[in-house]
Image (cartoon, helix red, strand yellow):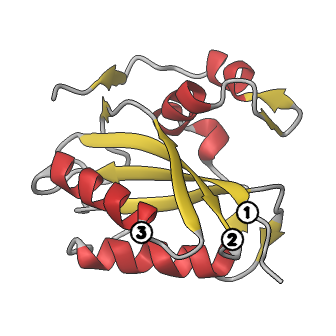
Amino acid sequence: MLATAVSAYIALGSNLGDRHAHLAAALVALAALPGTRLLNVSPIYETAPLGPAGQQDYLNSVACLATTLAPHALLDALLLIEQSRGRIRRERWGPRTLDLDLLLHGETALQDAQLTLPHPAMLERAFVLTPLHDLAPGLVLAGRTVAQHLSVLDRSGVRPAAL
């Protein structure tokens, strides 16, 4: 019996090297995952970094997938894609070639040592909610739509990226 596909939303970010190339390669890799189709991708935004000072600005986007992969299997795949682009985890919120965060996996709610769904900080981050809003403004999270959550955030640091 085949598993039913669910919608999964992935946040993409990069602030080292050829940021556009890292995001593009990630999208190709996401589309190639088994049991997965890339459904939609938001525009790319440029944002100030969270974390240590002196970092280059990030490019951020969100992708929507239809996938039969279970949440932990999808997370494992995301980590391998990050590694394939040279991601090295040195410090929390430090610079990175590629950051892929699993925001949502269907209606899954879970919290364990590896994964928390929905992503615990996404409702506080304009650099995540702005591109998510482009894809799913009416999606309900924690009793409010993405548009409603975004309306109370400071979006001044989120700007369309130059190509």
Asked if disc 1 and disc 2 are in contact, CB closer than 8 Å, the reply is yes
In the picture shown, does residue 123 fall above or below 104?
A: above
Q: Which residue is mark 3?
A: 32
- The percent coordinates of residue 119 (x first, y second) are 66, 56
- Visible residue check, residue 88: no
Q: Residue at x 43, y 61 (%)?
A: 31
> Residue 71 sits in which quadrant?
bottom right
- Tag 3: residue type? Ala
Asked if disc 2 and disc 3 are in contact, CB closer than 8 Å, the reply is no
Q: Which quarter shows the C terminus?
A: top left
Q: Neighbour class for label 3 at 10 Å: few (<14), some, many (≥20)?
A: few
Q: Give the numbered dot on residue 68.
A: 2
Q: Which residue is mark 1?
A: 5
Q: Give the numbered dot on residue 59.
A: none
- The percent coordinates of residue 114 (x first, y second) are 63, 80
Q: Is 122 left or right of 22, judged from the image as shown?
A: right
> Residue 75 sits in which quadrant?
bottom right
Question: For the residues marked 2 and 3, what is the alpha-carbon distance in whole angstroms?
Answer: 13 Å
- Closer to the N terminus: mark 2 or mark 3? 3
- Tag 1: residue type? Ala
Q: Residue at x 45, y 34 (%)?
A: 42
Give the SS element for disc 1.
loop
- Closer to the N terminus: mark 1 or mark 2? 1
In the picture shown, does residue 116 fall above or below 43?
A: below
- The percent coordinates of residue 63 (x first, y second) are 49, 47
Q: Neighbour class for label 1 at 10 Å: few (<14), some, many (≥20)?
A: some
- Tag 2: residue type? Thr
| Of the pair 36 and 163, the residue shown nearer to us | 36
- Closer to the N terminus: mark 1 or mark 3? 1
Q: Residue at x 28, y 41 (%)?
A: 59
Q: Is 87 left or right of 92, judged from the image as shown?
A: left
Q: Residue at x 36, y 24 (%)?
A: 157
